[in-house]
Amino acid sequence: MSAPMLMDYDEAIETFDPAMGLEVHVELGTATKMFCGCPTTYGGEPNTQVCPVCLALPGAMPTVNRTAVEYAIRIGLALNCTIADWCRFARKNYFYPDMPKNFQTSQYDEPIAFNGYLDVELDDGSGETVRIEIERAHMEEDTGKSTHMGGRTGRIQGAEYSLLDYNRAGVPLVEIVTKPILGTRAAAPLVARSYVRALRDLLLSLEVSDVRMDQGSLRCDANLSLAPAGTTELGTRTETKNVNSLRSVERAVRHEIQRQGARLVAGERIVQETRHFDESTGTTSSGRSKETAEDYRYFPEPDLVPIAPDREWVEQIRGALPELPWVRRARLQADWGFSDLEMRDLVAADAVGLVEQTVAAGATAAEARSWWSAYLGQQAKTEGVALTELAITPAQLARVITLVNEGALTTKLARQVIDGVLAGDGEPDEVVAARGLAVVSDDGALQAAVDEALAAQPGVADKIRSGKVQAAGAIVGAVMKATKGQADAAKVRELVLRTLGVEG
């Protein structure tokens, strides 16, 4: 019989125990590729960042990128892994349409880092922590990029032809592989999301990658299987490939639990295969049958010597590791006096570092949080970019805040200054000067504007004299309009009441 498409999630969790394995590929932020001197700059013209080595031309010999090895060791140490005394590369063979060599230089049974763990706080605000055990973190190279043209889905099925860009071929990767994650039950999708989020934060703090999931520098393969509830066996797994956002990791795991559950209760078997995740529908679709390690025909790479990291070098790297991001966040939250909700919002917006830098440049934490989470958050949303991509630096924002505190700008004028900075018109003081945005602080000019407004609205002036001081708002508004919003409203109100001999 034909299985229903999806099983109710709660019912699936009552019937089956999910087991996960997460493989995260991180592109390292080195200047050059893993085995040659080609640049790794993102977004270059297709096939302009290539050479005989990464194009696999006959006679071209690879050499190992030392910085990539250092970054791999840094990652392994931060994940509480053992760093190998000796390791080597292997050739991983299968059909790679976008890899000139038609094999990938990777590590198999001799990785540079192994047997680690990462304690992950769940993203639901409960404070619960789950330990994710790490099987290994190994070095390898990325493949090129295939673009399938003429089809409706962007995939090879139905395409008329494909374009190959080898710029990414050979970019250094570290693949971080977990051991089976068991016992998470209904929280499995949340655990997957929280783990990738924590790993992303960790890698960013290590300064080994920009971890841009939208650009593919951090990608997650989510393996999932179901077994009858209460049993210790593992079911047949599927691998959802190249999931590229935190939300999608959670949705992909949830969908696979429901999809596999529906097939198992209908008496169908799960096919071991790779699957693709569709962002628009939140569903997975079949890719190709999943190979086993034997199918890849691993054998040692004959053109590269083994790597034996010097122990003193490893300890130097260990000693230079930064403060862990969650430890840093707890410290900053205590220093800033933020609530848990305020801090979670900053973390969700990737704004903790921006606030920290703005505070270091002279602003208070409350002021920095307010600007980054409110007005600048709105600008980022309008432009469709991350906060960190806005064309304003923490130092520039701190200067705007200082001008407000000094009375040189009102909040309304400050927004206009920020708009000018975002538009590329220069530093905050240059924008103020060029656009004439400074607050009108000359008492004589303000008094003249107040007198003119009162003369234009004698009825309002009479109301204020009679004790209806709330009517002063109309005069203040007129003065603000006359000064193009550059007057201090509080000071204008004070002048209005003083001129009319009324106590505020």
Image (spheres, rainbow, N blue to C red):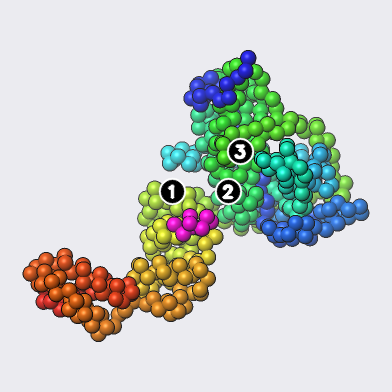
Displayed quadrant of residue 413? bottom left
Q: Earlier in the sequence, mark 3 or mark 2?
A: 2
Q: Earlier in the sequence, mark 3 or mark 1?
A: 3
Task: Decide: few, some or many residues near mark 3? Use Cα within 10 Å; few <14, some 14-19, many ≥20.
Answer: some
Is 290 positioned to the left or the right of 102 in the image?
left
Total number of numbered labels? Answer: 3
Q: Which mark is residue 344?
A: 1
Against 444, residue 49 (above or below) is above
Is residue 314 located in the magenta-colored stretch of the structure? no
Foreground disc of the pair 3, 1: 3
Displayed quadrant of residue 443? bottom left
> Magenta part mainly helix, strand or loop?
helix
Magenta-drawn segment: 378-387
Q: Amino acid at mark 2?
A: Arg
Q: Is residue 62 visible?
A: no
Is 152 positioned to the left or the right of 199 in the image?
right
Residue at the image position 39 percent from the left and 48 percent from the top: 340
Q: Which mark is residue 200?
A: 2
Residue at the image position 58 percent from the left and 17 percent from the top: 265
Give the spatial CA distance, label 2 vs label 1.
Answer: 16 Å
> Is mark 2 in CB contact (under 8 Å) with mark 1?
no
Q: Which mark is residue 278?
A: 3
- Nearer to us in this view, 322 or 28: 28
Q: Residue furthest right?
A: 59
- Under circle 3, the secondary element is strand
Is residue 383 located in the magenta-colored stretch of the structure? yes
Residue at the image position 52 percent from the left and 55 percent from the top: 384
Foreground disc of the pair 3, 2: 3
Q: Amino acid at mark 3?
A: Asp
Q: Position of residue 141 (x, y in %)?
A: 75, 49
